[in-house]
Image (tube, helix red, strand yellow):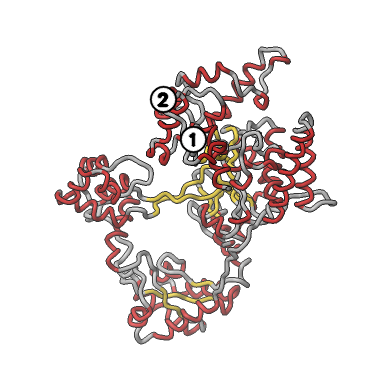
Amino acid sequence: MQAISSAHNNYTYQTPIINFNDLKNFRDNIVVVSGGKDSHIFELSKQNKINEIEKKIDDFLTVFKNDFFIEVQKTNRSDEIDFFSNILPLSNKKGIPLIATNDVLFSSKDDYEIHETKVCINTGKTLNDPNREKPFSDEQYFKSSDEMQELFKGFEELIDNTNEVAKKCNVSLHTKGYFLPEYPVPAEHNFDSFLVDLAKKRLSKLITDFEETKQKIYAQRLEYELNQIKKMGFSSYFLIVYDFIQWSKDNDVPVGPGRGSGAGSLVAYSLGITTLDPIDHGLLFERFLNPERISMPDFDIDFCMEKRDSVIDYVSKKYGADAVSQIATFGTMAARAVVRDVARAMGKPYALGDRISKMIPFAPGMTLDRAKDEQPVFAQAAKNDPEVREVVDLAYKLEGITRNVGKHAGGVVIAPGSLSDFCPIYNDRQSSSVMTQYDKDDVEKIGLVKFDFLGLRTLTVIDRAVKSINASIKDQDKIDLDNIPMNDQKVFDLLSSGKTMAVFQLESTGMRDLIKKLKPTKFEEITALLALYRPGPLNSGMHTTFVDRKHGKSPVTYPHELLEPVLSETYGVIVLSRTSHGVRQSSCRLFNG
């Protein structure tokens, strides 16, 4: 992992290459094999430069001694037999074991055509191009042990040598527990005690004006949450998030008020991670952290789009540049794109690929199978039109295959030390972005913690608007986003008119239509609205029921009389979905007994 990371940090070449001097640093922990058709030694063999091959071998032997091996392959490609003839006497002369390897590119021999199609897609060539280079062979499939024995019949010791190399290699990735960076706490504290001290001090300032009974409710809730956080071992996580959010606020980086289930935490509210009072809004902590299903907490944190990178720079300086990285994503060949690519690679007219692609519905997660179910025209063409069937049959075999590396929209990993101790690093040469070579799911599987630094243009717009307004009015009239009224009738009138373009999560056509029908009169109805505007509730008609009951067009009924106190706020409708402020209290109370 460290060698790969080192190669990606080498900007001397257009492709990741590790320098020999850097490779020396790993001499005690690696086995080095000479390489296949693209190696130095193979290239020298093609030029019949035997003396230079010997010199190159001596360089490796000097450093790696018994951990250096020469590999030979039989994949029915040019120069392999000549290489075998040239390297065998040198192997005997130097006492270096030869090992048999196989340059595997696909699973079975039948996959060769699929692989060649993928190569043509990547290179812009067509399968029937007579001038197309064909550097790969149909022998580069995953051979069985018996097939490899048969391939190297008469040279069985090469297979034995390969097995001996395999025995020398042993790597274990620890996938239990979490690896968090060391947040610097004062000498008299540990993570838990510092979080307790910080949260209690900050909460006391927030509830100073509350009556004593209400203060006790907040104190008890805080104590409960702090105990749960301590039991689950997440105190340092809260401190890390608190630190970079506080830095953002201190350095004029607009930060969102908090959304997702994290808004249910009073500790988060006390620390300023969120600015929504979970008790006031009836949100439960268990929706965020639950001791019965321990999983890493995950705050969705929005930053101003233009200043998000400055926050990432801050954590890089605090925890070390080699400990902070963004996360890779892997783009796959999706249904609409793969039929276009396959048609072009097969040398078919552009119009054919375009026609097939347009038959497939444009929807997230669309597959060829799903397209056949949802679009009869596509299913009929794929069955009855020979040209379409030929393209679709091959497209099936390529659908879902990874085609490119991208960057996760907001995920950032902060490791306790160098990231290359946990996973290999990828360096995108075009954007100079450093990323983990694992996607977000695998990053979490090996115990690294993902922090969401989401860039939100809405925050940029709001920040500019507030600064523009405040620049021209008196101090006592200046706008403070943390203290704006939640019952301004003019705001509800504006929302009810459907003029919500550029209002975060309220700007789609369907949402504007729904909000005009609902005509919200209180903040809680806006949060319910966001929960209802999701596929499940929309398909079941819950949104219509909610609107009709609010306006008295339908009677408010309850599944059971005991549910009336729970569901009265939502007119008897069980609102189950996540919203921008966690989960509506109806569902929380209902499903927590």
Who's the residue at 75% across and 37% down the image? 203
Residue type at tag 2: Lys
Who's the residue at 45% across and 31% down the image? 546
In the picture, measured across the screen, residue 394 lies left or right of residue 564, that is left
Q: Nearer the viewer, residue 463 or 295?
A: 295
Who's the residue at 59% across and 19% down the image? 488
Badge 2 is on which residue? 553
Percent across and percent down for residue 379 are 21, 48
Q: As displayed, is residue 220 above or below residue 27?
A: above
Q: Nearer the viewer, residue 258 or 185?
A: 258
Q: Nearer the viewer, residue 402 or 548?
A: 548
In the picture, measured across the screen, residue 588 lies left or right of residue 50, that is right
Percent across and percent down for residue 531 are 49, 36
Residue type at tag 1: Gly
Q: Nearer the viewer, residue 404 or 293?
A: 293
Badge 1 is on which residue? 572
In the picture, measured across the screen, residue 56 lies left or right of residue 114, that is right
Percent across and percent down for residue 190 are 79, 53
The quarter holding residue 478 reads top right
Who's the residue at 45% across and 21% down the image? 498
Mark 1 surroundings: few (<14), some (14-19) or many (≥20) residues within 10 A: many
| Of pointers 1 and 2, the one earlier in the residue sequence | 2
Mark 2 surroundings: few (<14), some (14-19) or many (≥20) residues within 10 A: few
Percent across and percent down for residue 17 are 52, 58
